[in-house]
Image (cartoon, rainbow, N blue to C red):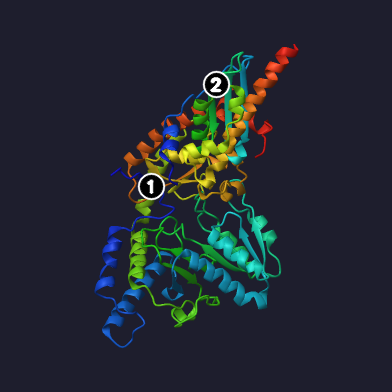
Amino acid sequence: MAYSDKVLDHYENPRNVGSLDKNDPNVGTGMVGAPACGDVMKLMIKVNDAGIIEDAKFKTYGCGSAIASSSLVTEWLKGKTVDEAYAIKNSAIAEELALPPVKIHCSVLAEDAIKAAVADIKAKKLAKVAA
Amino acid sequence: MERLPIYLDYSATTPVDPRVAAKMIPYLTEHYGNPASRSHPYGWEAEKAVENAREEVAKLVNADPREIVWTSGATESNNLAIKGAANFYAASKGKHIITVATEHKAVIDPIRELERQGFEATFLEPEPNGLLDLAKFKAAIRPDTVLASVMLVNNEIGVIQDIESIGKICRENNVIFHVDAAQATGKVKIDLETLPVDLMSFSAHKTYGPKGIGALYVRRKPRIRIEAQMHGGGHERGMRSGTLATHQIVGMGEAFRIAREEMASENERIRMLRDRLVNGLQEIEETYMNGDLTHRVPHNLNMSFNYVEGESLIMAVKGIAVSSGSACTSASLEPSYVLRALGRSDELAHSSIRFSIGRFTTEEDVDYTIKLLKEKIGKLRELSPLWEMFKDGIDISKVQWASH
């Protein structure tokens, strides 16, 4: 299969690979997908008290398009508010990376990972307020 | 131009041996007669070449040349054998067929087609090592079983089935026995004088011959009858009509002659290369070999690299040309049905690579492959959340994954 140059670039030089401290109250984690389906994405975001994403890291088990989709969103997330992040659509990811139709699910997974990470950090912050 | 990757996909196809190509060319440009032309030397010359080649094919498998029918390849041979025998004997014997879940699609799909026409089929699951349990095979036989089809060498995992014992069981129960030997010629010794096999499929292009030519062995004693699937001029004793492709046939004959003369020494050399590859790759943590370790051809190594996804792995190792056990690239997310039938988990099936080595593979090729795999697997595992969980001692099979 022919990959776009952007997919190849992210695949060969993935940005923001790694993990953040999951015990940090300012860190939200989203883990989506399943090994049986061939894709698992773990996205971690660090959000300051103003609701701005200061840092983002990822680890992905999956095809080149899945790795590229998650690498790309870590770049996009930094500096955004959690609400802006939540609004990122898979179609924007697919368009930026020129994903072929059979790989659209990789961009859907990346959107799901963002939503899961945002939901996690919101729950954590609510719990902190409640406590 | 970018350098082509090292070819380690000999089970997909092999290059035509230069000796084979040289022998074929005159039959395109000079001796171009139709082997069925009886009235002039052009035809006689072509016929002689076709019969010489038939003899070479028969010799490799210790058969009578009159038992060899030319086809376009192993897919056609399998179709002709399975549909041809099932339809011929259905009325007298019955409409039940036995095969194995790990057979090539060119066996599974003709049987599926017969199911649509009213036949019943049993697809036996192999043992975790890929081999068929003889007791299970015996138990599957019914009074109306007309045909069994079991491949000699598996294309994905390279295991060798016990064809002799399976054939004996078929004989005892009056079941026609077909064997797909596309992956076996030149790799394992085949003696049809002693093997209780009725029909056997061959391909040229897996054994350094050209694509587009194959053969079907049809036993004469006891005589096996098949219904033709292709009707026309009545070539090949009426079993397969169509003008014979002289140059392709000459190529297959020459390829099988070379296989017969050189397979002993060649397989020894290939076994040493394969062992070198296995030893190198086993230095990588969490690797699993697929298929029985002893009952397999020396050319094949099928290995799963846990916690690394197959398609990204194939992408990472573009310096070598190999096959993935994962069919992700064909748009479906299904992992290899062969590995699944062995009971491999989806993850392991997804992260497998088939390395198949052959006549032109060198020690340097193998060493490069080991170095490349070590480097790239390390890199992909750094990226893998599953590897991180494994290292943290989390049992991934116990995790509740959200389905998608």
Crowding near the residue tagged with mark 2, few <14, some 14–19, many ≥20 C-alpha atoms within 10 Å: some
- Is any part of residue A4 visible from this angle? yes
Estimate the x, y position of residue A2 in percent, counting from the top left.
43, 45
Mark 2 — residue?
Answer: A19
| Pointer 1 and pointer 2 on the same chain | no
| Front one among B364 and B140 | B364
| Front one among A22 and B102 | A22
Identify the image quadrant of the N terminus of chain B: top left
Q: Residue furthest top?
A: A131
Residue at the image point whose x is 66% and y is 23% from the top: A120
Report the chain holding disc 2. Answer: A
Report the chain holding disc 1. Answer: B
Residue at the image point whose x is 46% and y is 32% from the top: B377
Q: Point out which mark residue B270 bears.
A: 1
Residue at the image point whose x is 53% and y is 63% from the top: B179
Q: Is residue B204 left or right of residue B304?
A: left
Estimate the x, y position of residue B273 in percent, counting from the top left.
38, 43
Identify the image quadrant of the C terminus of chain B: top right
Estimate the x, y position of residue B249 in percent, counting from the top left.
36, 70
Residue at the image point whose x is 46% and y is 57% from the top: B183
